[in-house]
Image (spheres, rainbow, N blue to C red):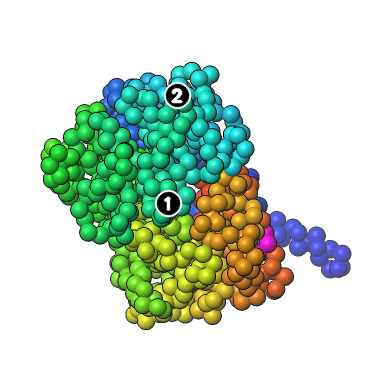
């Protein structure tokens, strides 16, 4: 046979053989830029699908007309609003936006529903009314606006807006039934102002100026004259949270005045004196709600991360404990997390390791608990999910720090297990034992242990503790706490010290980078999400309405001494000490930690010969909130852990 005929014959033979399908792969969503990432195999998508289909229902309030609940949940790509007519009834969708709904609050009369929503994660929130599935814009469409409170009659909405200059959150009121009534009541200086409540007669508003987690001031605002009058001391480091008028005009709030923890109490409007009424010797009162008639108050304490609900008779001070709720967490809410209906029913959301997030009611007389929603978990049995173990250790200087450790089932995954340490943001955040969502795949299918630390500076452990990381000189003590956790977990017989990794979001992303700087020799990889890489460039480029609030926490980059110290402790300055691979995820519209924070550290790592995967979502802000982007980031993270932590070819079976 001549050589010329061999290719033709080979082609003929090949055509007669059965086709071998190529490995199916998943294309990134349209808004994702995948730089230096491996492709995602379809097999991984199929394996993880049940874990990505869990939902949560967030309680947003009661309808005073028909007694239904308003909740936020996802049935498509984003969180939208639904009503639930009765316990166990269907969730009926009433908003249909492409962008997620952040918050919604119904008027006391029930005839108006105001929605707070941004565009592409830019956090320039606008206020709208929702009617018959359509949103009608109330605000200017450009500035940042934040819901404050409804007046008792539902004819006046109070809110804060950066409309005047982009930095200061001035105080506005309007009747949302007639947007032409919108008016600025008071010009202020700073980004932490808002209207907290209206007096029963509608002539006065309570205003809170929150300058940091440690300091806030309550004012009264005369709505006719615009005069602000301080109620509490304008000096000193005292925090007040959620001030509210009772039906008789008494002011309630939580405060750490003369205490290490937030207590519930009353404030004398004439003297500013705070009188606590909650008597728990430890832990913050995290949320509370007054009954419409003022007869009782429902409040929750943050007991080492677990929410404990109590009811207090306001006349006698007698307290009863609600025992029928799962041991879980009342999630953070833009509006009041606990709300009491006109009939006295208490409503709230709760999530735990085995409850993805659902809405509950409590009868104030019997304390009977009723679950209104039953959120889906992708067909998986949530009862098999791992409950965490509280770990407490003494750090490098003797300070006690703690965290929650989730260990895979040893019957299914014998031997020492790899571990991912997941560090919260804030920095005043707190890891609490809620629902892990897709991360249950790591535990249940890959046999990877998870640890969620609360380093010094975390909230929930008292005012002294939350201040231990303030300023550039104390900042790296939090990283030393991570080192102490690494020491403690290294001797845990269930864990494989040679397979540890770290991840974190926002400030936790800084901690992720910083842990890689200081402890690369003890890690396999670092997955850092919307993360600060340089404190100076972060402070210079974060949005102006929040810059002063962050300077209180991190330091002031305008001061030469503090600037030099901030530069010295920034991961970007120490990038040569990062010797583990990085995965960096970024939101293109992030107003808090701009995408440039990721660009500069990726460029530096690669220039130094290191490995950095980069996932940029161009239609997201500070974190991903569209399901297709969330899912793709999760799959990319799994590939990263498989290659770095597990030492596998991507998507191979777990060891």
Task: Judge whether residue 349 can be spotted in this image.
Answer: no
Residue 412 lies, in percent from the top left, at: 33, 69
Q: Is residue 32 left or right of residue 269?
A: right
**Looking at the image, which is closer to me, 376 or 246?**
246
Q: CA distance from mark 2 to mark 1?
A: 27 Å
**Looking at the image, which is closer to me, 59 or 652?**
59
- Above or below 88: residue 474: below
> Looking at the image, which residue is at 64% across and 52% down?
541
> Looking at the image, which residue is at 12% across and 42% down?
316
Residue 468 image-quadrant placement: bottom left
Quadrant showing the N terminus:
bottom right
Give the mark count: 2
Question: Quick one: label 1, few (<14), some, or many (20+) residues within 10 Å?
Answer: few
Which one is earlier in the sequence, the residue at label 2 or at label 1? 2
> Looking at the image, which residue is at 30% across and 56% down?
258
Residue 194 lies, in percent from the top left, at: 45, 38
Label placed on residue 235: 1
Give SS at disc 1.
loop
Q: Is residue 248 left or right of residue 244?
A: left
Dominant secondary structure of the residues highlighted in magenta in the image: helix
Give SS at disc 2.
loop
**Looking at the image, which is closer to me, 585 or 591?**
591
Residue ID for mark 2: 224
Task: Judge whether residue 30 can be spotted in this image.
Answer: yes
**Looking at the image, which is closer to me, 152 or 513?**
152
Q: Which residues are magenta?
A: 597-601
Q: Is residue 632 left or right of residue 344?
A: right
Q: Is residue 514 magenta?
A: no
Question: Quick one: label 2, few (<14), some, or many (20+) residues within 10 Å?
Answer: few
């Amino acid at each position: 046979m001549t050589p010329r005929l061999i290719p033709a014959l080979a082609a003929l033979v090949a055509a007669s053989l059965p086709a071998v399908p190529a490995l199916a792969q998943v294309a990134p969503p349209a808004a994702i830029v995948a730089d230096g990432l491996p492709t995602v195999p379809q097999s991984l998508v199929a394996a993880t699908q049940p874990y990505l289909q869990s939902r949560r229902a967030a309680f947003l309030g009661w309808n005073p007309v028909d007694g239904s609940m308003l909740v936020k949940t996802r049935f498509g790509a984003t969180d939208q609003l639904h009503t639930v007519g009765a316990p166990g009834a269907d969730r009926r969708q009433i908003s249909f936006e492409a962008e997620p709904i952040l918050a919604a609050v119904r008027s006391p009369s029930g005839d108006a529903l105001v929605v707070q929503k941004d565009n592409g994660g830019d956090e320039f929130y606008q206020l709208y009314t929702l009617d018959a599935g359509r949103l009608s814009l109330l605000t200017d469409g450009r500035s940042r606006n934040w819901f404050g409170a409804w007046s008792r009659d539902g004819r006046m909405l109070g809110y804060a807006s950066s409309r005047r200059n982009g930095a200061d959150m001035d105080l506005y009121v309007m009747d949302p039934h007639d947007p032409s009534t919108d008016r600025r009541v008071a010009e202020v200086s700073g980004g932490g102002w808002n209207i907290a409540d209206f007096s029963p007669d509608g002539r006065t508003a309570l205003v809170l100026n929150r300058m940091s987690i440690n300091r806030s001031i309550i004012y009264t605002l005369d709505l006719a004259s615009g005069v602000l009058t301080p109620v509490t001391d304008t000096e000193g480091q005292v925090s007040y949270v959620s001030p509210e008028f009772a039906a008789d005009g008494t002011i309630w709030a939580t405060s750490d005045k003369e205490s290490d923890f937030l207590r519930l109490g009353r404030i004398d409007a004439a003297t500013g004196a705070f009188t606590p009424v909650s008597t728990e010797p430890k832990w913050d009162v995290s949320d509370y709600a007054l009954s419409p008639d003022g007869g009782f108050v429902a409040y929750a304490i943050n007991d080492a991360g677990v929410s404990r609900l109590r009811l207090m008779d306001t006349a006698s001070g007698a307290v009863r404990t609600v025992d029928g709720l799962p041991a879980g967490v009342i999630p953070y809410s833009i509006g009041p997390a606990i709300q009491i209906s006109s009939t006295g029913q208490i409503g709230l959301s709760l999530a735990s390791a085995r409850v993805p997030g659902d809405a509950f009611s409590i009868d104030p007389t019997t304390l009977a608990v009723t679950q209104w929603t039953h959120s889906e978990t992708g067909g998986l049995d949530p009862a098999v999910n791992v409950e965490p173990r509280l770990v407490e250790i003494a750090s490098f200087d003797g300070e006690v720090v703690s965290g929650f450790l989730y260990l895979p089932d040893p019957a299914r995954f014998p031997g020492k297990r790899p571990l991912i340490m997941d560090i919260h943001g804030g920095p005043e955040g707190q890891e609490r034992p809620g629902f892990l969502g897709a991360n249950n795949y790591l535990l249940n299918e890959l046999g990877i242990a998870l640890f969620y630390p609360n380093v010094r500076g975390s909230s929930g452990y008292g005012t002294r503790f939350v201040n231990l990381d303030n300023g550039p000189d104390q900042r790296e003590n939090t990283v030393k706490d991570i080192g102490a956790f690494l020491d403690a977990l290294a001797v845990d017989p269930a864990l494989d010290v040679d397979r540890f990794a770290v991840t974190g979001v926002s400030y936790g992303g800084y901690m992720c980078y910083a842990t890689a700087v200081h402890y690369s020799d003890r890690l396999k990889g670092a997955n850092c999400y919307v993360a600060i890489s340089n404190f100076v460039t972060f402070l210079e480029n974060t949005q102006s309405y929040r810059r002063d609030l962050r300077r209180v926490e991190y330091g002031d980059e305008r001061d030469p001494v503090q600037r030099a110290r901030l530069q010295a402790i920034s991961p970007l300055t120490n990038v040569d000490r990062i010797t583990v691979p990085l995965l960096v995820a970024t939101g293109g519209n992030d107003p808090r930690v701009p995408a440039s924070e990721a660009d500069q550290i990726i460029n530096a790592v690669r220039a130094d010969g290191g490995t950095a995967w980069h996932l940029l979502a161009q239609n997201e802000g500070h974190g991903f909130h569209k399901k297709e982007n969330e899912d793709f980031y999760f799959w990319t993270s799994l590939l990263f852990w498989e290659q770095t932590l597990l030492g596998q070819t991507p998507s191979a079976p777990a060891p």
